[in-house]
Structure formats: structure tokens, C-alpha cells
Image (tube, rainbow, N blue to C red):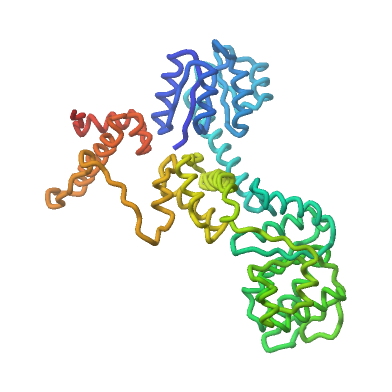
Amino acid sequence: MAKILIIDDERAIRNTLREILEYENYEVEDIDNGIDGLSLIKKEEFDLVLCDIKMNKMDGMEVLSEGLSIRPDLPFIMISGHGTIETAVEASKKGAYDFISKPPDLNRLLITVRNALERGNLVTETKVLKRRVSKVREILGDSAAISKIKDTIERVAPTDARVLITGANGSGKELVARWLHEKSSRLNGPMIEVNCAAIPSELIESELFGHEKGSFTSAVKQRIGKFEQANGGTLFLDEIGDMSHSAQAKVLRALQENKITRVGGEKEIEVNVRVIAATNKDLQKEIDANNFRMDLYHRLSVILIHVPPLSDRKDDIPILAHSFCNEICSDYGMPVKKISDGAMNALMDLPWSGNIRELRNMIERLIILSEKVITENDVRTFANPSGPQDVVAVPVSVQSPQVNFDQFSNFQEYKDQSEKEYIKYKLQKNNWNVSKTADDIDIQRSHLYSKIEKYGLKRSD
């Protein structure tokens, strides 16, 4: 349900606009001056603002400018009883979506509101899509370890030095690799990723170096390998510790000579590739166990970057949590939820064995399952959804009574009774605060008053 703010110093205009918009099932707030209107824009998430131009305390044009500085994508429709072409042009230059004269024409008003809301939705969707297709996200955190990683990236990225990134699963190794590519002179070239752990050992050579037609049973045509695809750019070998011995030998040769040979082929192909590798294993131990070649290790580890687990940099959790919360709420098209101090402390107390990936999943889970404010109890309840959860007790006075289904002669009677009990429960839970209850169950206050009257609900002291 779209939420609209009306800013106008004429009560009659505000009441008329509210009546029209609420009839169309919009959620409406109104205020009689621009200063208070800007305060509401800062505190609440509105989808559209209808703003008068000539007002006391603050001119509508000032409200428009300051409102857009607070929320640049918020559509403003300016209204005025002294409308001129010059005024409309000025409003458009300042960023207003449209201009309507008083008294507003009903049809034009509703069409303009609908179009402005659709534009706002398109802007939000465009931002989400741009972020989803963007090459790289920001490395978040102010801890000493993250600051050191950022500094190393700045120094190393412009060179062609090979980099070995180590760290636990989900700690952000791929993000470091992407930033090394983004800040390199190879930015305009491709960045090709290979997950060595996900490719069977018998296919890894074909994946990396390609193959000629007929080189093995299923080779029905020539295939270009990842080294050739990454020519002029960066090749990211993720989970390099899981690569087979035969593939390790060929990778070593490719790094030494900058040449490859396709499987089943004889021709040597020159490649110009910067290799960045990553692993969650201790390669020194793998070398001792004869699972990894020492000479390949030294070829790959010109620069070593270790990404610490989240448990070693818990001071970064608030920054990460708020960033994920904003991003996920934006993806879902919902107002950004707040994380209480207690909830943040509870998040920082968790072990985070899954690192950044686990934290993001946790924030997404909390956004979906929590109310407007994510509380400490939410974190405790949803931290381990597969295990026993804390049960929040509801006072007996607000519990809904058990329903005997045999008492209903038809479905409508059951629906009415269920709706009555649900509304009664919510009203009691919110101490009969009608405005809060309407917001809680996502209906208009006027609709809630109608329901209260329909079912004869009364507050019992």
C-alpha cells in the first residue's frame, strides 16, 4: 500500500485530498506546514508527497528542494491556487514530478498520483537491478584487518603480481579478488572465475585449457578454455587447493611460460593472463601431505592476502548488518527496518562460523520474520531456526479464544468471527491504540473504525 504525505496549510484542501486518496486505498498522512513535513520525511518512508507552494513558515519550493536533498528519489507533486506556467517550470527545474492547480481536478489528480508512484517504483527497481549486475560491492569494515586488506589492494592491484587469497568459506575472498581486478590496468578486460572444487578432476584440464574436437569421447567440437577466455584480463582460480595434481602441473607451466596447450592438441597458444588464486585450506599442510605442489604455491603466492573470519573482526558487524539491511529491504521494496541496540549486541555475540555469508542470510531472515524493529529476542529466536526456539508468551488477557468450528453454518460466518477475534486481539495487544493497530495490520484507520463498529468491539477496563 503506497504511503502519501500531504503538506498544505488549508485544512479543507488536506481533508479533500485525504478523502479522495484514502478512498483509492492509499495510506495518507497530512501536515499543515513545511517544517513539520520535512521532519516526517526524515522519520518515515513515503512513496509520494503532495505539497502546496504558498504556505506559512516555509515556502513549498523550499520544502521541495530540502525534501529531495533528504530523499532524492521521492516524487513531489506541487499544488497551488495561483498556478502559472512560470511556477510550473520552476517546480519542474527543482525536481518536482508534476504541478497541479487548485482546486484539483479529480481525474487528473488520480492519474498523476498513479504515474508518479509508478515512476518511483521504476526508479527503485532500476537501482536494485543495477546493483545486482554491478561487478563489485564495497569492502565494508573499519577493523585493522580490513584496513590492511584495503591498503594492500591499493598497492598490489595496479601491478601484474599474482595474488594468493586465503581465508575461511564465506569470509569474502571473492570480493577481494574482484577489487584487485577492478583497480588493475586490466579493468577493461574480462575477469573469468573457475571454482576448482566444483569441477571433477577429469574435466578440470579441459575447463582450464580447452580441448580439440575428438580429443576424448564427448569432445564433439573444439572448446576454448578459461585461460584463453581470460586473455588480457584476470583469471580467478577459486579453491585452488582442490585442484588435481595433473592440472597443477599444467597450470604451473602456463604460469612459467605464459603458454597453454589444449587437451588433445599440439599447438602452443600464448596467453596474457593475471592469475589470482584463493583457498580455504592451509596450503603448507597440503604440501606436507603431498596434495599440493610447492613450486606452484610459490608461483601463486607472490602476494599473500589473508581474509580473517568474522569472529576475529566483530567490530565490523554493525556496519555489515546495517548495509545488508538497507540492501535487502530495498530489494524487497519495503521500508528499511531498524536494528535495536540489543539486537546488534546479540548479533555480535554469535559465533559466525559461516562468516559474512551467514551474517547476510541471518539479516535477510530477520527482515522477513521480524516486525518493524529487529529486537534482541528476534535474534535469539531466529539465530538457529533448526533448533529449539524461544517462545514469547502472550498475556492471557490478549490471547484469542479457541474456536469451535461446529458453531458456524457457513464460511462467511467463520470469516467474520475470525476477523473479529483477530482485530480484538491486536487492539488489546496495542492497548487499544487504533492508529498503531491499523498500522500493525496494514489497513486504514477509517477501515479499522468501521470494523470496530461492525463487530461491536469495546474496550474492557
Which residue is painted at 39% across and 46% down in the image?
377
**Horizontal side of residue 316 vs 135, given as left or right:** left
Q: How many badges with numbers are in the image?
A: 0
Q: Nearer the viewer, residue 81 or 161?
A: 161
The answer to whether residue 205 is above or below residue 172 is below
Image quarter in which the N terminus is found: top left
Residue 57 in picture, x, y percent from top left:
55, 11
Q: Classify residue 279 by image quadrant.
A: bottom right
Residue depicted at 28% across the width and 46% down the height:
393
Q: Is residue 181 left or right of residue 445?
A: right
**Which residue shows up at 47% across the image and 24% down it?**
106
Work out which quarter of the rendered image holds the C terminus and state it.
top left
Residue at position x 77%, y 61% in the image = 190
Residue 271 position (above or below residue 45) = below
Left or right relative to 283: residue 434: left
Q: Position of residue 238 (x, y in %)?
A: 68, 68
Res. 99 image quadrant = top right
In the image, farthest residue toward the left: 407
Residue 196 position in % (x across, y down):
66, 73
Q: Position of residue 365 (x, y in %)?
A: 46, 52
Q: Answer yes or no: is residue 138 visible.
A: no
Compared across the picture, whether 298 is left or right of 402 comes to right
Q: Is residue 49 visible?
A: yes
Picture quarter containing residue 76? top right
